[in-house]
Amino acid sequence: MSVAEKKSSAIMALTILLWATDKLHHVEENQSAEHLMDAELVVEDGVTGILVPPGDVAALTAALEPLMRDGAAAAAMGARARQRVVTMFSLDAEANGIAQVYRTLL
């Protein structure tokens, strides 16, 4: 993996973490589990990220500590997360999914 790819993976992991943190905060405010589904679509727990219950600081700490101690594991998780997002949520993937729906309707 090149330096640029490593940086990209790390940025993706941080972006997902910050996005998830914002989503979890939003869930706490609204007491609605529906918003957690967004994170579950993007994050494959333990593979492309780690899901923790909203407001559970101890669980968040426990999830982050091993990644902070093992940069290679964190980078690998970030790379898997980036690949998942590119594969599942890119413009091409979305367009193909929409086209498939229309094909089934014809």
Image (tube, rainbow, N blue to C red):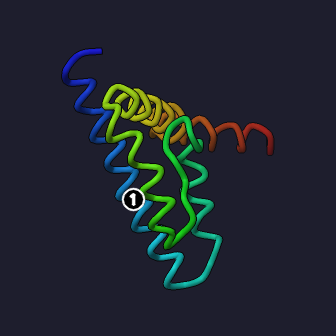
Residue designated by label 1? 19
How many labels, in total? 1
Q: Is residue 23 above or below residue 27?
A: above
The residue positioned farthest toward the top in the image shown: 1
Image position, residue 35 (x, y; %) = 58, 69
Residue at 38% across, 47% down: 65
In the rendered image, residue 60, in percent from the top left (x then y), is placed at 45, 58
Residue under the point 54% across and 58% down:
52
Report the residue at 47% width, 38% height from top: 85
- Farthest residue, direction right: 105
The answer to whether residue 46 is left or right of residue 21 is right
Asked if residue 71 is positioned above or below residue 32 in the image, the reply reads above
Q: Residue at x 44, y 33 (%)?
A: 77
Residue 38 image offset from top left, x and y in percent: 56, 59
Is 94 left, or right, of 5 in this rendering? right
Decide: few, some or many residues near mark 1? Use Cα within 10 Å; few <14, some 14-19, many ≥20: few
Element on which disc 1 rests? helix
Amino acid type, callout 1: Trp
Q: Is residue 5 above or below residue 24?
A: above
**Which is more toward the observer, 8 or 92?**
8
Q: Quadrant of the N terminus?
A: top left
